[in-house]
Amino acid sequence: MKSCELVVLLCCVFLPEIYALNNGLALTPPMGWMSWQRFRCLTDCNLYPDECISDKLFRNMADLMSSEGYLEAGYEYLIIDDCWLEKERDENGRLQPDHKRFPYGIKNLSDYIHSKGLKFGIYEDYGTHTCAGYPGILGHLEVDANTFAEWGVDYIKIDGCYADFDDYEKGYTEFGQYLNKTNRPIVYSCSWPAYLESNKIYANYAYLSEICNLWRNWGDIQDSYSSMSRITNWFSSNQDRLIPYAGPGHWNDPDMLLIGNYGLSIEQSRSQMAIWAILAAPLLMSVDFRTIAYEEKQILLNKEVIAINQDPLGMQGYLAKKKFDIEMWVRPITPVKSRAYSYAVAYRSMRDDGYPYAINVTLNELSLNHSKGYTVKNIFDNSWRENILQVDQSFIVRVKPSGVVLFKFTPN
C-alpha cells in the first residue's frame, strides 16, 4: 500500500465521527459567483452607488445570474465576501450587517436570492477580525453557526486572518461541528491551507478532506495572467500532494475565475477556464454581469467545459508534460468504455512569440493508450471536425500565445 493511501485509511478509521463534515454536499466542484475579485471592499455607496458592497449590488447580481443563463449553466451559489458587516456585534453578541448598506438585513436578502432559484453564500473569518477588519468568529463559533443557519446560508467561506496558525485545525474543526449541529446543509470552504502553504508549511490535506468541502490552497488570485500563472505553476509543482485528496465532497481551490474583468485577454480567459476544468476546481466567477462582454460570457457558459469540470468521477487532473513551452494538462473523465477513461487534455501555451505555435504530438506520450484509439473533439473550436486518432498517430496542435487548445478524447 502506498504511504498516501495508508494516511487516508488511518484518518478514516481513527478520526472521531463528530469531526467529519457529513453534509453530503459539493459532490462536484461548487459553481457560483463571489464578490471579492471584482468588487473587493468598496463600501462608499455615495461614491460608488452601483458597485459598493450592498443589498442593492447582490440583488442585481442575483437577478442577472438567474435571467442571463448562469444559473441554468450550473452557477448556483451567490456568495458575499468580506466587508458586509458592522464594525461591532449587536447587543446580544450576534453578527450584524452594515445597517446603511444592508437596510433589510441578511435574512431578507437571503430570501430574495433563494426566490431567484439561487443558493446563498457568505464570508467570515476564523480569527478575531476578518481580513478587512470586521468582527471575526473567534470566541463566537456556536452562536455564529446558528446565526448563519437562521439566515438561510447555503455556503460559507471561512478565512484565516488574525488567527494563530497553531489554532487552525482545532478551530476550523470546531466550527464545522457547529455547522453540522444546525442541521442545515451548508457547504464549508476553509482557507487555512492558503496561509500555511504561503509560508512554506505543508497543510494536512487528508484531514482537511474529512472536515471541509473545499479549501483555498495558496495565495489570492489577482486580476492578471501572471497571477493566474503563478497559481497554476504552484499547483503543478505540488500536484502529487494535492491530487489524492480531491474528489466528490472535498476539492482543492485555486481561487476565483478572472474571466470578464480587466486582466485577461480572450485567449487567456479560455486558458483559465480550461485549466480550472482540468483541475476539478470550484468555478466561482467574480465579474460584473452588467458589463461582461459577449465573448467572455460565452466562455463562462461553455457547456462542454463545464461538463469536464463537473465530471462525476471527480478526478483532479494534472500537468503531464511540457514541451517547447507548451504545457499538456490531462484529466480522466467519463464516459468510461471497456475500462478505458475518456480524457480532457489542455495544450496550454506559455510562449509569447506572436503566432500560433505548432507542436507535433501523439496520445501515447500522455499515456492515452486505448488500443482502438479515440474520437477527438476540439472544445473551443466548433469548426474543428471530429475525427479518430490512434495512440501512436502524430498530429499537430497549434496554440496561440498564452492561449489553450482543449480536446476531449473518447475511447472507441
Image (spheres, grey):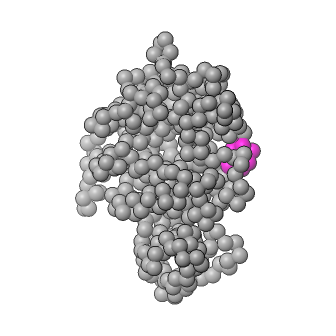
Q: Is residue 137 above or below residue 316?
A: above
Q: Main secondary structure of the magenta part?
A: helix
Which residue range is magenta in the image?
Answer: 64-71
Q: Is residue 216 above or below residue 346?
A: above
Query: Closer to the camera, 30 or 52?
Result: 52
Q: Is residue 67 magenta?
A: yes
Residue extending farthest to the front is 47
Q: Which quarter of the rendering shows the N terminus?
A: bottom left
Residue at 62% of width from left, 52% of height from top? Answer: 261
Q: Position of residue 84 (x, y in %)?
A: 56, 29
Query: Closer to the camera, 306 or 131?
Result: 131
Q: Position of residue 410 (x, y in %)?
A: 56, 73
Residue extending farthest to the top is 91
Q: Is residue 217 left or right of residue 355?
A: left
Q: Is residue 327 magenta?
A: no
Q: Which quarter of the rendering shows the C terminus?
A: bottom right
